[in-house]
Amino acid sequence: MSFVSALTATAASGAPVWRADRGDGTYRNPILHADYSDPDAVRVGDDYWLISSSFSHVPGLPVLHSRDLVNWQLVTHALPRLVPENAFAMPQHGKGVWAPSIRHHDGKFWIYYPDPDFGLYLITADNPRGPWSEPTLVKAGRGLIDPCPLWDDDGNVYLIHGWAKSRAGFANVLTLLKLQPDGRSVAEDLGVVVDGNRLNNYTTLEGPKLYKRNGWYYIFAPAGGVKTGWQSVFRSRSIRGPYEPRIVLATGNTPINGPHQGALVDTVAGEWWFLHFQDKGPYGRIVHLQPVAWIDDWPVIGRDPDGDGTGEPVLVHTKPRVAAPASAPTEPPTSDDFKAPTLGQQWQWQANPRAEWFSLSAQPGTLRLFPQPEAQENLFHAPHLLLQKFPALEFTVTTELTLQTGDTRAAAGLIVFGFDYAWIGVRNGHVVQTTVRSANEKPVVTDTRGAAVSGPIRVRVTVREGARCQFSYAGADGAFVPLGEPFQARESRWVGAKFGLFASGSNGGGADFRYFQVEPAQP
């Protein structure tokens, strides 16, 4: 069996790099070991739809679907390109789409999302798989973040949001807006409804989600920071407050740091569940699922061993009871054989893409990346990197590369990307492993050169627990040979490390990738 055939067989076998469904009626956390940061979700009938922040990666606003809250598939991105268009022609690390919310009202799906530099936007769709409308700027302004709507029983529409101190000069407060009936503009600014500065030990109060249940208005909002914080809930009989606070989820006696910010959903069977993230450094903000119990009209999230009303995360739990047929164990895609007319849903660029960056038709069954000159010396600022999220604690990625160009400085390869980045590929007729540390500040570059290359070369990275990466390469039929020192992956601005493909240069030609295979970590 050839190497390519072996890879195809591995893909067909469906061996996952991470699977939350344990196959015995239980699941393990995280349900998504990938950087779906600031998750929000909604149930419509038997279907659950989840979205997350995407910052400056394009396409933005991933939309995932599930029937049981455990097994998720990535079905589309609601934002094909970022706006304003020119502002995202080049990488804008940490900018773009921050924490969004998704709701279903009046037969439509509504996503409100913030761009901290421009304001609060709205897009809508009849079907969450798309197409989605062009963005409407609901409220312009710097520092407005994390919007969430509520259509009240009396027909009024409200939108709550937080503030980013980096833009507004203040934070730790939540503001309520009354919208026009169409939800597309502001009718009245109702001011601050929760002030974290008036609460004991509260910092970084943000990410609010607005709900109504049993005559109570609830604001679910995290505080304390992404790595060390907790989940608070505020309730009131009036949407304008005053609101009383309670911490309903914290780390407790678990290894799950900073469990907070997410979505409250129910099942047709009457259960309640909470989706939230955990900041895991280079792995990004991964997604957990917690059971919710209501006691005296307060939610208790996770398990509460001491009965004080503050839950802690569960690591393993019985799956939700749902009316629909059980979802087959599944997870978002990672591998790509490049046989489809479009790239897989898992891929994102570092900026709004241009047609001249790639082709899937120049050589069918192959991805051709055309070398681009921008930021060739420091790929941290390159817009043409084609990347995806780390999908598991450990995994191996393999691709076959042929670089054809007259530019001796051109390079192409397999990259692990963050504040530090490293890649293995081809430059000037040789296999090269390059590591760039402090890429966002003062880059320090280390090159290790391998064998001469005159045709296709296979390159690989194996990621071990802790995001330690070892690069290697092999000829057509030979064994893989390690190249370079192990590389410690790092996160980037508000996102985890990513991995993928690139081609940089200035003199024509192309880099052909025959496949992109992600599988369980190889020895």
Image (cartoon, grey):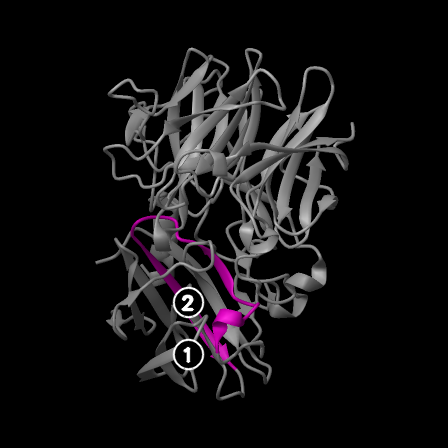
Asked whether residue 397 is drawn in magenta, I would say yes
What residue is rendered at 32% in x and 41% in y?
257
- The percent coordinates of residue 351 (x first, y second) are 60, 62
Q: Nearer the viewer, residue 202 or 177?
A: 202
Above-or-below relation of 429 to 224: below
Q: What span is in magenta?
A: 378-404
- Compared with 296, 345 (above or below) is below
Please tell me whether residue 360 belongs to the stretch shown in magenta. Answer: no
Q: Nearer the viewer, residue 42 or 68?
A: 42
For residue 131, say whether it is visible: no
Residue in the foreground of this view, choosing between 293 and 71: 293
Q: CA distance from mark 2 to mark 1?
A: 12 Å
Q: Which mark is residue 426?
A: 1
- Mark 2 sits on what residue? 415
| Residue 258 locus on image (x, y percent) | 36, 40
User: Which quarter shows the C terminus?
Assistant: bottom left
Q: Amino acid at mark 2?
A: Ile
Toward which corner of the image does residue 321 lie, by quadrant? top left
Quarter of image, res 215? top right
Tell me which residue sits at (55%, 11%) in the image. Answer: 214
Left or right relative to 208: residue 1: left
Question: Quadrant of the image for the N terminus?
Answer: bottom left
Q: Residue at x 34, y 20 (%)?
A: 309
In the rendered structure, which disc, 2 or 1, sits on the residue that comes first in sequence?
2
**Mark 2 falls on what kind of element?**
strand
Disc 1 secondary structure class: strand
